[in-house]
């Protein structure tokens, strides 16, 4: 089972700023099949990014994913108020522990 | 657009068996592109995949739960189910059912139910 470690645990930023979230795997990920999810309080996670860098349907282009091998990044170019949430990375049956993006 | 809805008890006693059912609407559970999954999320923690099944009954379980888990599918009802036996307080979680896209890029949980909180307590 792949172990995914996300950092930081909490990120405090203001609307309009740029957010950079990290996900590190303990082994190389096959074909970079890493996905990112957003979860808001009381809601199920929803798919943002798949294949490390492809946006899911309806996801705005301020969200971007990058990385390969063991190191992956989710970037939100200019934070909107609705982007403050918890973000998880996922590879097959493994999820990271999450990064909480909060308003500073 | 596919929708999923979990159903089952919100409270289970220690040592008992949890039974949950997920009803799929707006799409067929018999699609070859998908598996159907159970995922749980303990309060304040990240999601944890429990297991998956396709319409043919091919199953995969999380290794740490394999001895206690059974997932089944009923294509006539467009439903799939979870049984988790010997429940303990550590199994208290929000339980989600979801659709797993196994074609696009690895395994993607592209649709989720709203989730149901299951508390283990006497």
Image (cartoon, rainbow, N blue to C red):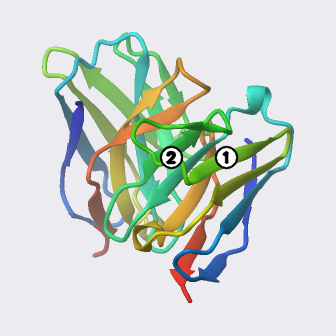
On the image, the x and y values in percent for residue B85 come to 38, 48
Answer yes or no: do the residues labelled 2 and 1 have beta carbons within 8 Å?
Answer: yes
Q: Secondary structure at mark 1?
A: strand
Position of residue B56 relative to residue A42, above or below, is above
Q: Quadrant of residue B76?
A: top left
Kindly identify the residue that appears in the image at 18 percent across and 51 percent down: B8
> Which chain does tag 2 point to?
A
Graded by Cα atoms within 10 Å as few (under 14), some (14 to 19) or many (20 or more), the crowding at tag 2 reads many
In the rendered structure, which disc, 2 or 1, sits on the residue that comes first in sequence? Answer: 2
Kindly identify the residue that appears in the image at 42 percent across and 74 percent down: A81
On the image, the x and y values in percent for residue B35 come to 42, 23
Position of residue A41 relative to residue A102, above or below, is above
Q: Residue furthest bottom?
A: A104
Q: Which mark is residue A38?
A: none
Residue A7 showing in the rendered view? yes
Structural distance between the alpha carbons of marks 2 and 1: 9 Å
On the image, the x and y values in percent for residue A18 come to 65, 69
The residue tagged 2 is A48
The residue tagged 1 is A65
Tell me: B86 left or right of B113.
Answer: right
Kindly identify the residue that appears in the image at 52 percent across and 22 percent down: B102
Front-lying residue, B42 or B113: B113
Q: Secondary structure at mark 2?
A: strand
Front-lying residue, B62 or B16: B62
Residue B15 showing in the rendered view? no
Tell me: A9 left or right of B100.
Answer: right
Task: Locate the C terminus of chain B and report the quarter of the image it occupies.
Answer: bottom left
């Amino acid at each position: 089972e792949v172990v995914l470690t996300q950092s930081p645990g909490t990120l405090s930023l203001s609307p309009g700023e740029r957010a950079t979230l990290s996900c590190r795997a303990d082994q190389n990920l096959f074909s970079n099949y890493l996905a990112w999810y957003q979860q808001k309080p009381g809601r199920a996670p929803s798919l943002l990014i798949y294949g490390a860098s492809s946006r899911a349907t309806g996801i705005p282009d301020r969200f971007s994913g990058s990385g390969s091998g063991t190191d992956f990044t989710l970037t939100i170019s200019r934070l909107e108020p609705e982007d403050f949430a918890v973000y998880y990375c996922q590879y097959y049956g493994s999820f990271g522990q999450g990064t909480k993006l909060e308003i500073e | 657009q596919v929708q999923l809805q979990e159903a089952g008890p919100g409270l289970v006693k220690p040592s008992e068996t949890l039974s949950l059912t997920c009803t799929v609407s707006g799409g067929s559970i018999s699609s070859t592109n998908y598996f159907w999954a159970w995922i749980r999320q303990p309060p304040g923690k990240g999601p944890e995949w429990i297991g998956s099944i396709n319409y043919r009954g091919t199953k995969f379980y999380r290794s740490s739960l394999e001895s206690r888990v059974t997932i089944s599918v009923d294509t006539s009802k467009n439903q799939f189910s979870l049984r988790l036996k010997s429940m303990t307080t550590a199994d208290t979680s929000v339980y989600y059912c979801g659709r797993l896209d196994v074609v696009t890029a690895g395994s993607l949980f592209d649709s989720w139910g709203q989730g149901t909180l299951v508390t283990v307590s006497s």
